[in-house]
DNA sequence: GTAAACCTTAGAGCGCACTTTAAGTCAAGG
DNA sequence: CCTTGACTTAAAGTGCGCTCTAAGGTTTAC
C-alpha cells in the first residue's frame, strides 16, 4: 500500500502524545473501523505513518465539532471505497456544517443571555435594591 | 410562598409543550433538585407557575450551552439560600462563560476546516486530477 | 359504569463515547 | 534469568443525561 520506503513511523504511544489522544481511544477507533489499515510489526504491534496521523487529526476535528461516531464511520467507509463517493462525502460534510453553524449560533445566543445575567449580578453587587424577575422567550 | 392570588398555572404537560421539554425531564429535574418548590394540588399533581417556567427556561439555556447538571445544581442551591451568594453565582456564570467562549472559538475553527474540505471536494468534482494529502497542525 | 387519558412514584434501562480491566506477549536492561 | 514496561486482545465498566417501565390513582367523556 505504501510506496514511500523510509517513511517516518510512530508507535501508539507516540501518536497518543503527538495527537493528544489516548492510546485506548486509538485502539477503540481502529476496532470500530474509524482508523483503517493500520500496519503491524511482525510481533503484532501497531505502526502508524503520517497518513494515519492525518486521519487521527481529521477524526478528532470531526468529533470535537460534534459529529457522531456513526456518521464518522459512514464517512470513513465511503472514503475507503474510492473517488466515486465524493458526492456523498461532500453531502455529509455539508450537512454537518449546517448543524455546526446552527449550533454555534445557538451558543452565541446563550452566551449573550449569560452575559446579561452576569451584568445583572454585577449591578446588584453595586446597588442591591430588589430582585427582579427572569424574562423568557 | 406566592402573593399573587390568581396567577396562571400550568400542568406538567402544558409546561412540557410550551417549554419544549419532556414531562419526564421535568420530573427528573425536580427529583434531582434543579427545580425546587413546585407546588402540588390536593391530589398530588404538579402545578407550575410563571416563576417555574422562568427557571425551566434558564435551566434549558444553561444545559444547552454545555453546563453540567452538577454545576447547575450548585447554582440552583446557592440561589435558593439567599442574596448573599450573588458572588458565587456570578463566579459560576463567569467561568461557564469562559468555557463557552473557548468552545465557540474552537467550533469556529472546526467549521473553517470543514469548509476547506468541502471546497476541496467541490474542486475535485469540477476537475478530478489527483487526490492530494491531508494537512495537519 | 367504564374506558381513555393523564397523573403519580420508584427504579430500571438506554445510548453514547469512551475507559478500564484482566490476562497474556514481547524486548531491553541489569 | 528476571524484572520492568510497553504492547496485545476481548470484554466489562463508567458517567452522563436522560428515557422508559410498571403499577397504581384520578379525572373526563360518553
Image (cartoon, coloured by chain):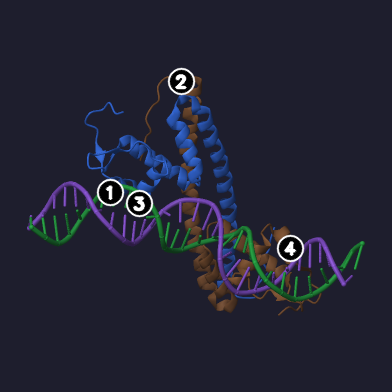
Chain colours: A brown, B blue, C green, D purple
Tell me residue A124's x, y (percent): 47, 24
Residue A136 sits in quarter? top left
Looking at the image, is B42 positioned above or below residue A17? above
Label 3's element? Answer: helix
Q: Are marks 3 and 4 on the same chain?
A: no
Q: Do callouts 4 and 2 point to residues on the same chain?
A: yes
Disc 1 crowd rating (10 Å Cα; few below 14, some 14-19, many 20+) is: some
- x, y percent for residue B52: 34, 38
Labels 4 and 2: the sequence-earlier one: 4
For the C terminus of chain A, the quadrant is: top left
Instruction: Give C13 or A127, whichever is nearer the viewer.
Output: C13
Secondary structure beneath dot 4 equals: helix
In this rendering, the label closer to the viewer, 4 or 2: 4
Could you tell whether B48 is left or right of B108 in the image? Answer: left
- Which chain's residue wears label 2? A
Q: What residue does disc 4 label?
A: A13
The residue shown at (73%, 78%) is A2
- What number is the disc on residue A7? none
- Residue B89, image x and y in percent? 50, 32
Q: For mark 3, name the chain.
A: B
Disc 2/disc 1 C-alpha distance (Å):
37 Å
Q: CA distance from mark 4 to mark 1?
A: 52 Å
Evaluate whether label 3 is on the same chain as label 2: no
In the rendered image, the vertical position of residue B101 relative to residue B135, given as above or below: above
Of tags 3 and 1, the one toward the viewer is 3
Q: What is the C-alpha distance between the residues marked 3 and 1?
A: 10 Å
Q: Chain of mark 4?
A: A
Residue B88 lies, in percent from the top left, at 53, 31
Amino acid at each position: 500500500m505504501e510506496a514511500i520506503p523510509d517513511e517516518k513511523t510512530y508507535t501508539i504511544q507516540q501518536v497518543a502524545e503527538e495527537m493528544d489522544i489516548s492510546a485506548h481511544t486509538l485502539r477503540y477507533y481502529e476496532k470500530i473501523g474509524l482508523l483503517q489499515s493500520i500496519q503491524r510489526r511482525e510481533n503484532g504491534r501497531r505502526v502508524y505513518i503520517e497518513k494515519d496521523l492525518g486521519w487521527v487529526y481529521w477524526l478528532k476535528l470531526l468529533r470535537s465539532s460534534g459529529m457522531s461516531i456513526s456518521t464518522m464511520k459512514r464517512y470513513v467507509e465511503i472514503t475507503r471505497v474510492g473517488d466515486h463517493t465524493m458526492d456523498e462525502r461532500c453531502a455529509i460534510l455539508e450537512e454537518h456544517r449546517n448543524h455546526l453553524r446552527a449550533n454555534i449560533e445557538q451558543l452565541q445566543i446563550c452566551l449573550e443571555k449569560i452575559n446579561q445575567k452576569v451584568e445583572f449580578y454585577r449591578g446588584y453587587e453595586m446597588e442591591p435594591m430588589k430582585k427582579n424577575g427572569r424574562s423568557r422567550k
